[in-house]
Structure formats: C-alpha cells, structure tokens
Image: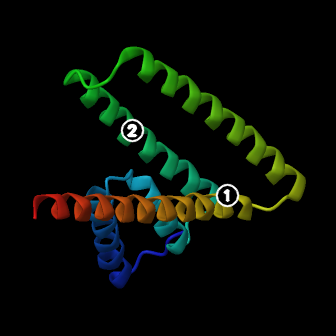
Amino acid sequence: EIRWNAVNTIRYPLLCSLAGVLAGLFGVGGGIIKGPLMLELGVEPQVAGATASTMILFTSASAAVSFQVFGLLKGDYGTFCFILGFSCTLLGQVAIQRWMQETKRPSVTVLSIGFVLAISTVLLVMEMVGHMARTEDLQKLVL
C-alpha cells in the first residue's frame, strides 16, 4: 500500500505525469510504463498488473476506434487481430494463474511485466536501428 505523506503527494503525481509523457512519446500504452512504476511505489503485483492491463486495453481500443473512423483499418484484418489477441491473452492469463497457484508466489506477475518490458525494449531498439538505416540509405540516394 502506498503511504501518503507530504513528499509522496508531490512525487507520485510527478512520476505519473512523466510516465504519461514518455508513453505518449514512444507510442506505447501507459500501462507498459506505469506497471513497473506502480511496483516501485509498493502496489501489490496483482493490482499493478491488472491496472496496467486495463490502461493498455483502453489505449489500444481508442487507437483501434481512431483507425476505424479514419478508414485506416481493414475489417477482416482487425477482426483477425482481435481474435488472436483475445485468445493469446486468455491463454496467458490461464497459464499465469495456474503457475501462481502451483508456486504460491505473486512474483510471477512481476516477472511477466519485466519480460514484456524487456521484449518491448529490444523491439523498439531494432525498429529504431532499422529506421536509421533506411534513412541513411535514402540520404545517400538523394546526394
């Protein structure tokens, strides 16, 4: 549980604001940034994981609606991605729940958040390097 005092009343909202700005800059759901932040603040792992998942749900749903409104989302592709995402989420939830019941350790939630963050970081770096390489190739063609 978070202990609210004079310092934490200023510190936590500032950290959450910074997390929101970073999430917007990197184009990721706020839950990816705020999940680890909530763990650092002392929130229980199950609560932090559920809250982060809810934030990601609303972020991705609003993005999907925006793409649909502007005609940038193909219906069959969107339906396929929704079914795939829902199925994989359900499978992961059941697997993690069983693992937690067998081991009787809530740290599984923390490990899964860390794993997702690690994979996201690697993919972000790969995308950045690929973009930089394409940009350099285009600049060579222009010159």
Q: Which numbered marker is on residue 60?
A: 2
What amino acid does circle 1 point to? Thr
Find numbered disc 2 in the image and state the secondary structure of the residue it sits on: helix
Looking at this view, name the residue that lies furthest to the right.
102
Q: Residue at x 17, y 58 (%)?
A: 141
- Where in the figure is residue 84, as x and y percent of width and height? 58, 28
How many numbered marks are there? 2
x then y, percent, for residue 32 = 46, 57
Relative side of 73 to 77, left or right: left
User: Could you say which is closer to the camera, residue 85 or residue 16?
Assistant: 85
- How far apart in space, not on screen, are marks 1 and 2 (Cα)? 21 Å
Mark 2 residue type: Ser
**Left or right position of 103 against 26:** right
Of residues 130 and 7, which is closer to you in this image? 130
Q: Residues within 10 Å of mark 2 (few under 14, many from 20)?
A: some
* Residue 107 on image: x %, y %: 72, 64
| Quadrant of the image occupied by residue 106 | bottom right
What is the number of the mark on residue 109?
A: 1
